[in-house]
Image (cartoon, helix red, strand yellow):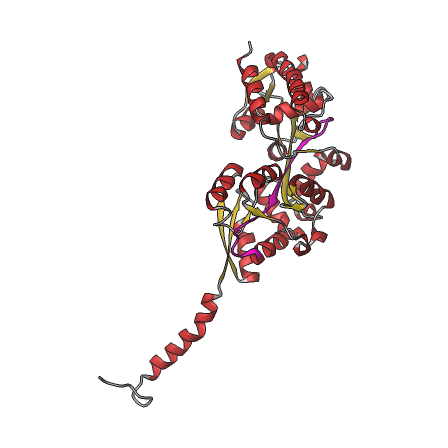
């Protein structure tokens, strides 16, 4: 057997081996953040900037509420370091499947967040004294109206006015039930804990929606379909999301999103940490990074939705910022009805109401 001595060893091999040995600790220490989120919430330029500034690689999986729950439930909260479920899809899921861990708010840079959004998210995600969500991206559903009918349609039930007969569209989904309830002077969220009371509210909404059927051009089922109806003028007033209204406003200033008099219906997509996250530190770094105003504005520009970052609207592209400010005064923001967690059984009840409305002549 040939034994290599210091004098016979190839110097180039020695240098190469030394370099590899020096790199191994750094390669082993390479970090990764596995993020499951919605489209537009992790734009390429934001991911690249985070990776450059932190050295942490970001692996993005695009998803939605149902898919997030399914994936995390299947693994007991493993597979991802950070998720972005909506605020009303956390408590019930956590109570049933235990897939998240409490948020350590001492690690959150609260100075960058709008206090009202933090309060609403904590209220919606509190379980046994712990909070399971941090506000991220938010939006509302309300009214998209053409200026020609703006004086007529200022609340959800105005879609039933004879002045807009045949020029109206909305979805046969639960937001329509909730919006019509508030416009009728009822409070469906306050009745969440009383099934009989909630059923009574839904009965009144059902009657109103059946009476309103003659006004409806079509019940829209997809965003592209609705935008096309509004662009062509076939529909002059609709119940829909704010981002769609702002998109149309950029194309045609005569179309705009309006916060209804009874209140826009608000959702907040949160940051939530899966129970078996392998890089919790990177998750908190991402939260604090993307909620900086200038970074958060990039998310708004990509997704069309505003964030919980305080002051971020100053950095949003001008036409979107102006449309947002035209839709939401301080009073309108304070009047937003934020979705609370849905108690078990109510969605089944709502589905039966919607089926009867659909079947009614």
The one nearer the camera, 253 or 98, is 98
Which residues are the magenta region?
A: 259-280
Q: Is residue 137 above or below residue 107?
A: above
Q: Is residue 151 above or below residue 18?
A: above
Quarter location, residue 133: top right
Does the segment drawn in magenta span residue 112? no
For the N terminus, which image quadrant? Answer: bottom left
Q: Is residue 224 visible?
A: yes
Q: Is residue 346 above or below residue 65?
A: above
- Name, please, the residue furthest toward the top: 361
Is residue 62 left or right of 125 when viewed as pictured? left
Q: Is residue 258 above or below residue 87?
A: above
For the C terminus, which image quadrant? Answer: top right
Taking the spot 31% from the left edge, 85% from the top edge, the residue there is 9
Relative image position of residue 226 (x, y in whole percent): 55, 26
Relative image position of residue 300 (x, y in whole percent): 61, 44
Does the segment drawn in magenta span residue 265? yes
Relative image position of residue 334 (x, y in whole percent): 75, 36
Quarter location, residue 13: bottom left
Relative image position of residue 111 (x, y in whole percent): 72, 53
- Name, please, the residue furthest toward the bottom: 7
- Name, please, the residue furthest toward the right: 331
Q: Is residue 155 visible?
A: no
The one nearer the camera, 196 or 72, is 196
The one nearer the camera, 164 or 21, is 21
Is residue 122 left or right of 68 when viewed as pictured? right
């Amino acid at each position: 057997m040939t034994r290599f001595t210091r004098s016979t060893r190839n110097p180039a091999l020695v240098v190469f081996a030394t370099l590899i040995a020096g790199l191994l600790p750094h390669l082993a220490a390479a970090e990764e953040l596995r993020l499951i989120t919605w489209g537009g919430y992790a734009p390429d330029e934001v991911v690249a900037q985070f990776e450059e500034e932190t050295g942490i690689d970001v692996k993005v999986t695009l998803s939605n509420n149902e898919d997030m729950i399914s994936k995390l439930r299947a693994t007991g909260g493993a597979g991802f370091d950070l998720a972005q479920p909506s605020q009303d899809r956390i408590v019930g899921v956590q109570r049933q499947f235990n897939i998240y861990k409490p948020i350590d708010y001492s690690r959150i840079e609260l100075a960058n967040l709008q206090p009202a959004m933090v309060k609403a998210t904590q209220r919606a995600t509190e379980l046994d004294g712990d909070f399971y969500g941090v506000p991220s991206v938010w939006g509302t559903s309300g009214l998209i109206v053409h200026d020609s009918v703006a004086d007529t349609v200022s609340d959800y039930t105005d879609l039933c006015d004879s002045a807009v007969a045949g020029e109206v569209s909305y979805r046969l989904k639960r937001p329509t039930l909730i919006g019509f309830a508030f416009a009728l002077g009822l409070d469906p969220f306050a009745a969440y804990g009383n099934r009989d009371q909630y059923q009574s509210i839904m009965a009144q909404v059902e009657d109103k929606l059946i009476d309103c059927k003659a006004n409806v051009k079509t019940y829209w089922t997809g965003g592209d379909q609705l935008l096309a109806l509004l662009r062509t003028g076939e529909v002059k007033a609709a119940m829909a999301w704010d981002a769609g209204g702002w998109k149309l406003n950029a194309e045609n200033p005569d179309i705009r999103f309006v916060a209804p008099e009874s209140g826009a219906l608000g959702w907040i997509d949160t940051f939530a940490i899966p129970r078996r996250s392998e890089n919790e530190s990177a998750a908190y770094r991402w939260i604090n990074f993307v909620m900086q105003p200038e970074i958060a504005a990039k998310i708004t520009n990509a997704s069309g939705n505003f964030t919980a970052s305080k002051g971020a609207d100053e950095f949003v592209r001008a036409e979107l910022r102006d449309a947002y400010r035209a839709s939401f005064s301080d009073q309108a923001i304070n009047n937003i009805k934020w979705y609370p967690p849905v108690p078990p059984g109510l969605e089944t009840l709502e589905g039966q109401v919607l089926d009867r409305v659909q079947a009614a002549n």
